[in-house]
């Protein structure tokens, strides 16, 4: 098989071969990790984006070599998502405050 570009989408077979994770395990992980959502096309064919590929590699490492359980990985990913959402909300609030201050300075 020829090497795909890093940003190319992968089929479930390609991802399975590349990561060593069986296809049925990848399908199972899709039911357990809401963050893992490949695109599906006609015939329900799955296409994994680069972010999905990175997530599969991470889940595989956490489960395989770092000793996490499925529940542990779910908790870890959920807490990271919550932290990112909080950081994003803080960033939006900071930008909004800066814009309000800039507009107020223009009218003074």
Image (tube, grey):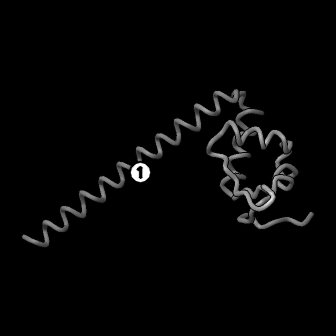
Q: Is residue 45 left or right of residue 32?
A: right
Q: Residue at x 73, y 46 (%)?
A: 57
Image spot of residue 1 (x, y percent):
92, 63
Q: Residue at x 36, y 53 (%)?
A: 91
Disc 1 is placed on an element classified as helix
Q: Is residue 35 left or right of residue 24?
A: left
Note whether 96 is above or below 23 in the view shown: below
Note whether 54 is above or below 101 in the view shown: above
Return the residue found at the far bottom. Answer: 106
Using a 10 Å C-alpha cutoff, classify the residue at mark 1 as few (fewer than 14 neighbours), some (14 to 19) or many (20 or more): few
For disc 1, the marked residue is: 88
Q: Residue at x 78, y 55 (%)?
A: 44
Screen quadrant of the C terminus? bottom left
Quarter location, residue 40? bottom right
Q: Nearer the viewer, residue 93 or 45?
A: 45
Q: Residue at x 90, y 66 (%)?
A: 2
């Amino acid at each position: 098989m020829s090497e795909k570009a890093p940003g190319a989408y992968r089929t479930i077979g390609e991802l399975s071969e590349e990561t060593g994770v069986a296809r049925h395990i990848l399908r199972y992980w899709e039911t357990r990790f809401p963050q893992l959502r490949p695109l599906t096309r006609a015939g329900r064919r799955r296409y994994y984006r680069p972010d999905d590929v990175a997530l599969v590699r991470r889940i595989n490492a956490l489960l395989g070599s770092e000793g996490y359980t499925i529940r542990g990985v779910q908790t870890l990913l959920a807490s990271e998502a919550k932290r990112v959402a909080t950081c994003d909300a803080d960033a939006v609030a900071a930008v909004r405050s800066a814009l309000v201050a800039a507009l107020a300075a223009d009218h003074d």
